[in-house]
Amino acid sequence: MSEHSRYQELRAHLAFLRMTAAAEALPAALDEAKAANLSHQDFLERLLSVEVEAVDERRRASLARFASLPSPFTLADFDFSAQPSVDKKMIDELATLRFIEDATNVLLIGPPGVGKTMLAVGLGHAAVAAGMRTYYTTAAELAARCHRAALEGRWATTMRFYAGPRLLIIDEVGYLPLPAEAAAALFQVVSQRYLKGSIALTTNLGIASWGKVFNDDPMVAGAMLDRLLHRSVVLNIDGDSYRMRSHRARAEATRKAVAGS
Ligand code: ADP
Ligand code: MG
C-alpha cells in the first residue's frame, strides 16, 4: 500500500470512529513525529490526547448548557464577610462535593437577598466543573413543566428527567403557594431522589411554616420534609439582604458626597 493510500485509510478510520479532532490534527502530528523522530508510543499518545481534550471540552460544555445555571457566579465570588451567618467552613466542605456522593440534600433557608440562590448556583458550577450532571430549576418552573407534562401524557418521562441529574437545584420554594398538583409533583420529585441524588433547595420559609407551600396540607409537608431532611445539611441564613446592603452603601456614599460638597 502506498504511503498516500495508507494515510487516506487512517483518515477514514478516524472519521469512522468520529475522532474529528484527531483527524484534523493528523497531518501536523505525522509531520511532527517525523521531524522529531518520535516513537510510535509518543506519536499515538499525542494524537489521542488531542481527541481526549476535544471530547472532554465538548462534554463539559454540554453539561454546562444542560445545567441552565442562571448566573456565572461561583462560590469563590461569595463575600463571606458580608454574610456572617454563613459558615465558610461549611461551604468549603460542601464545595468538595462529598455531599453528592452520598445523596445528601442542602437546604438554604432565609429571607430574600441573602445569597441563597448564589450559593446554590455556586454549588452547581462546582458540580459541573467536576463533570457531574446538574440541573437548575425554580419551584415555579418545575410546577409549570409538570403541569404541561400531565396534560400531554408525559408525566413518567418528566419524573425520570428530574430523577436524572446528580445534583438538582430547586430554587425559590415557598415564594408562591403551590397548587395541589404542583405540590404533588414536587413531592414525587423529592421522593424518587430520596437517598439516590442530591437536591439543593432554597426557600424563604422556615421549616415550621412549610405547610403553607402545600396548601396547609401538613401530611404532605411532613412527608416531604422527612425525606428532605433525613440526610441533609441545613443552612439558615439570616441577616441583611446583600442587594439592600450595597444599595445602602451607595446611598450613604452619595449622601456623604452631597454633604461634603
Ligand atoms: P436570595 O436567593 O437569597 O434572594 P441571591 O443569591 O439572589 O439572594 O443574592 C442577591 C444578589 O446579591 C445577587 O446578585 C447575589 O449575587 C448578591 N449576593 C448576595 N449575597 C452575596 C455575598 N455574600 N457576596 C456577594 N454577592 C452576594
Ligand atoms: Mg433567590
Image (cartoon, rainbow, N blue to C red):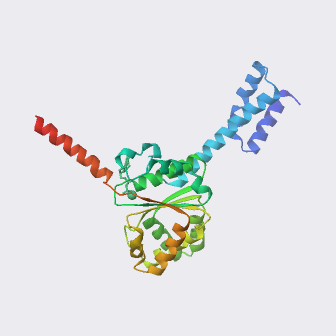
Residue 114 percent location from the top left of the image:
36, 54
Compared to 25, does 225 lie above or below? below
53 relative to 84 in the view: left or right: right
Quadrant containing the N terminus in the rendered view: top right
How many numbered tags mark residues here?
A: 0
Q: Is residue 178 at least partly visible in the picture?
A: no
Residue at left offset 84%, top offset 27%: 3
Return the residue nearer the eye: 216 or 70.
Answer: 216
Q: Quadrant of ligand 2?
A: bottom left
36 relative to 71 in the view: left or right: right
8 relative to 112 in the view: left or right: right
Compared to 121, does 146 lie above or below? below
Q: Is residue 135 at least partly visible in the picture?
A: yes
Compared to 56, does 109 lie above or below? below
Image quadrant where residue 171 sits: bottom left
Residue at left offset 78%, top offset 23%: 38
Residue 236 percent location from the top left of the image:
41, 59
Residue 261 percent location from the top left of the image:
10, 34
Please identify the residue farthest to the right as the structure is shown.
1
